[in-house]
Amino acid sequence: MTLLEVEDLLVTAGDRTITAGTTLTVAAGETVGIVGESGSGKSMTARAIVRLLPPGLSAKGRVVFRDKELLGLDERAMRSVRGSGITMMFQDPFTMLNPLLRSGDHIAESLDRGLSRSERRDEVVRRLDEVGIDAGEIAKRYPFQLSGGMRQRVGLAAALARDPELLIADEPSTALDVTTQAEILHLLARVQEDRGMGVVLITHDLRVAFSVCDRIYVLYAGSLLEVGDPGSMEQQPLHPYTLGLLLSEPAADRRQSELLAIEGSVPSADDVTGQCSFAPRCHWAAEVCRRADPPLVEVEPGRLSACVRIGDIRSEMLELRRSVAIDAAAIPLVDVVEEPLISVEQVSKTFRAGGREVEALRKVSMAFDRKESVGLVGESGSGKTTLGRCLVGLETPSAGSVTIDGIDASDYQALSSDDRARLRRTIQVVFQDPYSSLNPRHTVGRALGEALRVHDTRGASVDALLDQVGLSSAYAKRKPARLSGGERQRVAIARALAVKPRFLVCDEPVSALDVSVQAQILNLFKELRDELGIGYLFITHDLAVVRQIVDRAYVLYRGEVVEEGPVDALFNDPQHEYTKRLIASVPT
């Protein structure tokens, strides 16, 4: 039974096109995935379906839910559809949870108004129990008192409170670590099966989409380029863009010699009108691809593609897919030195707030050498970021010692200015969100120029730094708001390189990026290591990323190192139960 039919959905902002004629269907009990890079129009498509577009945007076409045309309804009638018919669940539950309301109150607000107080209280308990939450412990807590995974569970319970027939989940697991992500996806699948509910899953994480969806729509620059079931699409994609996404995804079971990233970034729909939207980035693009906007047609039963050359290039695409699937590169062995560049000995860190103590690190010992790339993996709250901040002086250990290049770096504030400056030239940090670490009012050139001046780096220039990270000198005149996520991260890396450090602490530097941009940045890190002989501590919860970039890895669990070793040995033959659980949680 079809729940939702979307036909020729056009989303515009004035005279600017956001999506150009999206068509899709969702049946009861079915999970449909919409995948694509940021800027492709995924979230705007979802918001148009439920009539929640931001001010200034409008939608045309047909959106039929249960034989009811939604785009023609007035707002009062549409409110009766939202919640009980269709509901949305967002990536960041903070955007849908009121920070001033307790968790249980979010559920109570969404329930039927006709319930008595006791019935409402019982129903809140039942709804929280459905998503695996102990109401007695969690219902009275505010959102900021919950972990990311727990907030997402509360958000799901609130979204399901009025028993919708269709759930639209917009990046519901992207910001979560691998084990929490697996729990949320399993929970979503169980609730869907129990209710017979339809689900539209919007994500740029191909592993997630291919592991849980029945059918996938590939969206790019506002246009649908391919539709099909995930099994067939994974084995043989029928559009070069889908192939590019799959090739950009790092393998979790082996080190690849190189990630085949899609060069460039997603254009606006209007910039590629009248041609194949992917032609400017496509390896197989020909003149015929630039003459007209190709239609989405059935290539084989259940498989649709908008590539006019698919008949000519299909065998080449398949061969490339097969070659990458078996590509494996040896991980270099790094000589162990007696005096490592960085030594962490029995480091503990305790945070105190409101009379409570939280032990973030507990007697952690590690060692890193120059030119070595080391991974630090674990769930959110395991202590990864705390350790990284201790290394660069943003936190001071409660106990233990940190030695960097022969200097006791346990407490940066206790150092002489000369020693502190020497440490800054030895070790630098690249953060997860480059936008928050770049001043939005300053140009790229000013940000890099200040880094060069502060550290008195002679012989270096802004243009040279930009060239080092694959950006032209024209970027010096731009501000962060005019950069894509990948470009901002390149600028952040350039700023860290301004002092010519010997070691970089990289704290989740690719977790917020699309898979194609992630591949570009990972390849950049590899190139910089080869060219500069720089070492890395790569902090991440993505085990596939770890496999591609590091030689050794440490596994942190609740502030303690539970396993350490060469990355292949660690992931091919894990010894600790927690490491085994991490690896088993990776979507396939």
Image: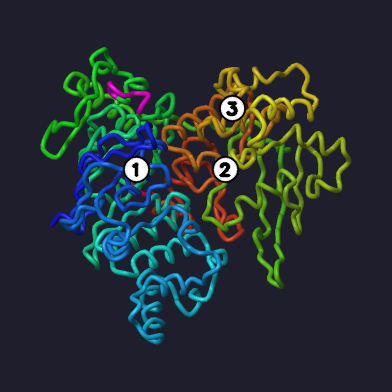
Q: Is residue 274 magenta?
A: yes
Which residue sits at x=38%, y=32%?
16
Disc 1 marks a residue whose amino acid type is Ser
Q: Which residue shows up at 24% across the image and 64% down it?
A: 193
Q: Is residue 302 above or below residue 559?
A: above
Residue that numbered label 2 is attached to: 432
Q: Taking 490 as reference, is 397 left or right? A: right
Residue 315 location, x and y as percent?
Answer: 20, 22
Which of the two discs, 2 and 3, sits closer to the camera?
A: 2
The answer to whether 457 appears left or right of 266 in the picture is: right
Please tell me whether mark 1 sits on a helix, a strand or a loop.
Answer: strand
**Relative depth, front residue between 437 and 273:** 273
Whether the magenta-drawn stretch holds residue 9 is answered as no
Residue at 26% over, 25% down: 317
Q: Is residue 184 above or below residue 444?
A: below
Cα separation, mark 2 vs mark 3, equals 19 Å
User: The disc labelled 2 sits on which kind of residue?
Assistant: Gln
- Frontmost residue, 259 versus 20: 20
Residue bearing the label numbered 3: 529
Label 2 residue SS: loop
Q: Which mark is residue 58?
A: 1
Residue found at the far top of this picture: 287
Residue 238, percent from left and from top: 22, 30
Q: Is residue 290 above or below residue 295?
A: above
* Comes first in the chain, label 2 or label 3: 2
The residue segment tinted magenta is 270-276
